[in-house]
């Protein structure tokens, strides 16, 4: 498995790159961005890494060019990985018919329904293939990894962390879809990808996961704009708040007066999120045993060909 370099640009003395590779999980060519801070070039030890998950219609590019995160990431010495939001270049019926299903709308699930199940495996791609690929090619410390995201990506960040506390030591979200089982976006996506049985949806719903598994990690950080046009119908942060209260899970839910759903909202508070993650990832920890039944990055190595750092081309 070889990485192809699409672009590399110096940014705040670090490197902002975009790369592509052939993905066994999704069966297509995937793209992702990586910001490597200047400390990665000179430090004697790998740097912490954050995975950013974007929302509906986005690609790997949106966060890179709109969030303004590189300056603070360079200061803090944190790498940021920005994957795409779905497989691309796949010819499936209906894949491009709507903005909230198919292209740009993978919902960070492993689809079980035909024809989506062959390619729409974003959960396994993000939690297994991509971290293995990043660790093999960049100087990052997988034991100091965090995840954050926006909207659909906020849902992804929460569910991935809740299911994989051994992989992610820190999690935050901007305007996440708090409970996909209870909103139109989520019901459409989960029905299409997973089928009509709602019990199967619970593994991809943050409120259901907190109810069944709890969360013993660092507090969850969520920012939500009060003028978000999707607040009442799609996002419903009160569901996450109430579930955390019942389960005794620490949640810092900050309602931001006057902010909407856009990247202007993200850019306004991304520094606070980066500093939050930097505090949580400041100490190297030993990865505990998995309890989710997934193979994890170590298992993924066994299913793939060797990947060396000098494979960048």
Image (tube, grey):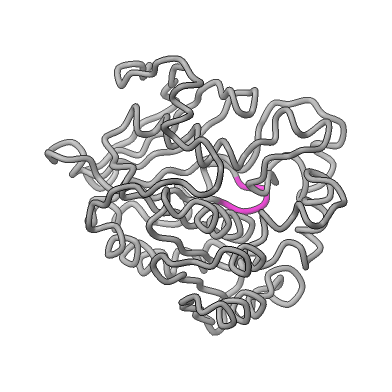
Q: Position of residue 291 (x, y in %)?
A: 50, 49
Above or below: residue 256 compared with residue 266:
below
Q: Nearer the viewer, residue 4 or 308?
A: 308
Question: Left or right: 64 with respect to 230?
Answer: left
Q: Residue at x 17, y 40 (%)?
A: 45
Q: Nearer the viewer, residue 93 or 250?
A: 250
Q: Residue at x 52, y 57 (%)?
A: 149
Above or below: residue 270 compared with residue 166:
below
Q: Which quadrant, please, contains the C terminus? A: top left
**In the rendered structure, which segment of residues is drawn in magenta?**
54-58
Q: Residue at x 45, y 15 (%)?
A: 305
Hey, which quadrant is residue 29 in on the image? Answer: top right
Q: Position of residue 301 (x, y in %)?
A: 43, 25
Residue 55 is covered by the magenta coloring = yes
Q: Position of residue 165 (x, y in %)?
A: 45, 55
Question: Left or right: 310 with respect to 85?
Answer: left
Above or below: residue 7 compared with residue 269:
above
Q: Nearer the viewer, residue 175 or 110?
A: 110
């Amino acid at each position: 498995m070889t990485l192809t370099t699409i672009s590399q640009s110096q940014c705040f003395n670090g490197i902002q790159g975009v790369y592509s590779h052939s993905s066994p999980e999704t069966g297509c060519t995937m793209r992702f961005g990586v910001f490597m801070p200047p400390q990665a070039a000179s430090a004697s030890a790998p740097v912490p890494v954050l995975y950013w998950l974007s929302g509906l219609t986005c690609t790997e590019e949106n966060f890179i060019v709109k969030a303004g995160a590189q300056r603070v990431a360079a200061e803090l010495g944190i790498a940021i990985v920005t994957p795409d939001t779905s497989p691309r270049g796949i010819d499936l019926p209906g894949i491009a018919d709507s903005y909230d299903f198919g292209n740009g709308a993978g919902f960070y699930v492993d689809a079980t329904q035909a024809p989506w199940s062959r390619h729409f495996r974003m959960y396994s791609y993000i939690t297994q293939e991509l971290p293995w690929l990043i660790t093999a090619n960049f100087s990052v410390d997988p034991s100091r990894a965090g995840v954050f995201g926006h909207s659909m990506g906020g849902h992804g960040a929460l569910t991935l962390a809740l299911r994989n506390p051994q992989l992610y030591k820190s999690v935050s979200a901007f305007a996440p879809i708090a409970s996909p089982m209870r909103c139109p976006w989520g019901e459409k996506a989960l029905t299409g990808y997973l089928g009509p049985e709602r019990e199967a949806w619970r593994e991809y719903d943050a409120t259901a996961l907190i109810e069944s598994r709890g969360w013993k990690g660092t507090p969850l950080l969520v920012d939500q704009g009060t003028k978000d046009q999707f607040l009442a119908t799609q996002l419903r942060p009160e569901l996450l708040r109430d579930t955390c209260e019942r389960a005794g899970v620490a949640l810092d839910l900050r309602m931001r007066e006057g902010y909407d759903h856009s990247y202007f909202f993200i850019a306004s508070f991304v520094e606070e999120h980066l500093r939050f993650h930097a505090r949580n990832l400041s100490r190297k920890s030993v990865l505990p045993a998995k309890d989710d039944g997934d193979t994890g990055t170590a298992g993924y190595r066994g299913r793939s060909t060797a990947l060396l750092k000098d494979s960048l081309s």
